[in-house]
Image (cartoon, rainbow, N blue to C red):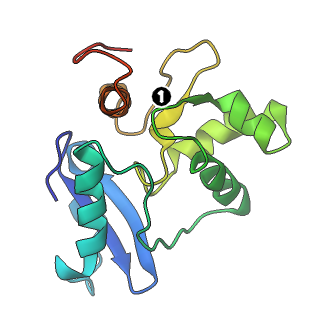
Amino acid sequence: MPSTVSSLLLIGDAAGLQRICFCKHCDYRELIEDDWYESADFFATAVRELEEYFAGYRRVFTVKIDLHGTDFQRLVWQQLQRIPYGATQSYKDIATALGNPGAARAVGMANHRNPLPIIIPCHRVIAADGALGGFASGVELKRKLLILEAESLGKYPAGRLF
């Protein structure tokens, strides 16, 4: 699907949406298995909700998801979904919320492996000093997503960068 920041590849099955890939930043052909098929109808809800997000008025996603990861990764991803739209938290904030303030680096690794960016808002996690930190799809894309959210809430004038 096209978006304002990149083309997106949505991957999933009857169990739910399993992965979103920013096509600008990965070779999506490597992700596709032989028995997969293309179906725009199958992802209609996800596409609609993502379009609403990029238009600036979708704050919470309801699309059915099917996460695959370690127990720790799933805990981190659940915590990421608690970060409000337009807000940020540090890796240490997430680790502390999980009861392990020393696990900021492990939180960063789980964040990096997030299979559903935007829906699980890993772009809202920043360094403790306020720096953007890393983002699997590039810091500039992270910046764009944060600006989109801030502008839709009226927090920053158009084009202001973090």
Number of on-image labels: 1
- Residue 38: image location, x then y, percent: 17, 79
- Which residue: 32% across, 70% down? 11
Please say if 17 is above or below 121.
below
10 Å crowding of disc 1: few (<14), some (14-19), many (20+): some
Residue 127 location, x and y as percent?
A: 59, 21
Q: Is residue 128 left or right of residue 135?
A: right
Answer left or right for 95 relative to 63: right
The x and y percentages for residue 53 are 30, 49
- Please state which amino acid type lies under the numbered disc 1: Gly
Residue 117 locus on image (x, y percent): 42, 50
Q: Residue furthest front?
A: 154
Residue at point 45%, 54% (across, down): 60
Residue at 36%, 75% in the rendered image: 12
Q: Is residue 122 left or right of residue 56?
A: right
Residue 128's place in the image compared with 35, above or below, is above
Q: Secondary structure at mark 1?
A: loop
According to the image, label 1 marks what residue? 134
Residue that appears at 48% across and 45% down = 121
Picture layout, residue 69 above or below residue 132: below
Q: Is residue 30 visible?
A: no
